[in-house]
Image (cartoon, grey):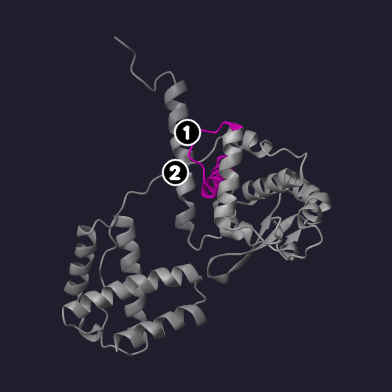
Amino acid sequence: MSDGLLDLYVTYLRAERNVAARTVDAYARDVRDWLDELGRRGRGVDAATRDDVLEHLAWLRRKGLSPRSTARHLAALRGFHRFLEDEKLVPGNPTDDLDTPRHARTLPVFLTLDEVEVLLEAPGVETPQGLRDRAMLEVLYATGLRVSELVNLAMNDVNLVDGYVMVMGKGRKERVVPLGKHAIEAVAAYLGSARPAILKGRVSRALFVTPRGAGFSRMGFWKLLRRHARTAGITKALSPHKLRHSFATHLVERGADLRAVQAMLGHADLATTQIYTHVDGQRLRSTYDRHHPRSRRRAS
């Protein structure tokens, strides 16, 4: 019975909710762990209680699961049991009224403006690969795309005349993100000569291509980014997501409307975007403490 219910839930997430494949897989694994635990106790999913859920979450914590991962696990169980309840497949929902495990929210790590500048200048433009790499970095910083969104851009997703990209984000939700002047120029230079030179007569729908004619993998771009970070002398551990953080932080610092930043990032919930106001506030506090004459006690 349990396997059949999990299959129904996975089909619902994919077909009706249009949830991203990786999220579906993560939720399916979490629900499978829960069902296996119930099975070891000799209980069916229709007989699961609130105490069963609490014991399961405690077991996950004893195994070393972080509060953040435990919260995600509970979200998966909530979704599963709400689905079963809504479809009248079980009589109740054991996750009702359970609080999400609290976890400290870490502020995102981001690059300074100077670090961004030297990173974007790191790829040499004397070679087709350098033109391509600079265009990729410019687009990533100009748009704040997720790395998966960047490497999946197709030729017809980019409009250089009006200056925007069409992005297919999480949950198959499409959004329009503006491109800045430098990104437009970098992509135009790449398309003009570098892309045909890299493809050597091959045909590809991908915007950013490798010599094999294929698009980049996420790991392939990660390696490219790290290589150019070393060239730029950036010592911070750098990832594509930190450029996304840099994009959002620099916008908020300059007074961008939070709703607009939310739309560009593709966040479903404004609360996710609000982390960047904390970053800005932290920087203001630091500036105040350094410069205000009454921010610190005088040495006696």
* Position of 53 relative to 5 (above/below): above
Residue 10 relative to residue 173: left or right: left
* Position of 55 relative to 193 (above/below): below
The residue located at (79%, 50%) in the rendering is 194
Q: Name the one closer to the observer, 176 or 183.
A: 183
* Position of 293 relative to 165 (above/below): above
Quadrant hosting residue 61: bottom left
Q: Which residue is mark 1?
A: 284
Residue 299, horizontal then vertical, whole percent:
32, 11
Magenta stretch bounds? 232-253
Mark 1: which secondary structure?
helix
Disc sitting over residue 278 in the figure: 2
Which residue is the extreme one toward the top?
A: 300
CA separation in Å, label 1 and label 2? 10 Å
| Quadrant (top left/top right/bottom left/bottom right) for the C terminus | top left
Q: Is residue 262 visible?
A: no
Residue 177, horizontal then vertical, whole percent:
66, 57
Residue 105 relative to residue 122: left or right: left
The residue located at (66%, 36%) in the rendering is 122
Asked if the magenta segment contains residue 243, the reply would be yes
Residue 90 relative to residue 134: left or right: left
Residue 176 relative to residue 67: left or right: right
Q: Earlier in the sequence, mark 1 or mark 2?
A: 2
**Magenta span dominant secondary structure:** helix
Asked if the magenta segment contains residue 50, the reply would be no
The residue located at (39%, 23%) in the rendering is 295
Q: For the residue marked with disc 1, what is the amino acid? A: Leu
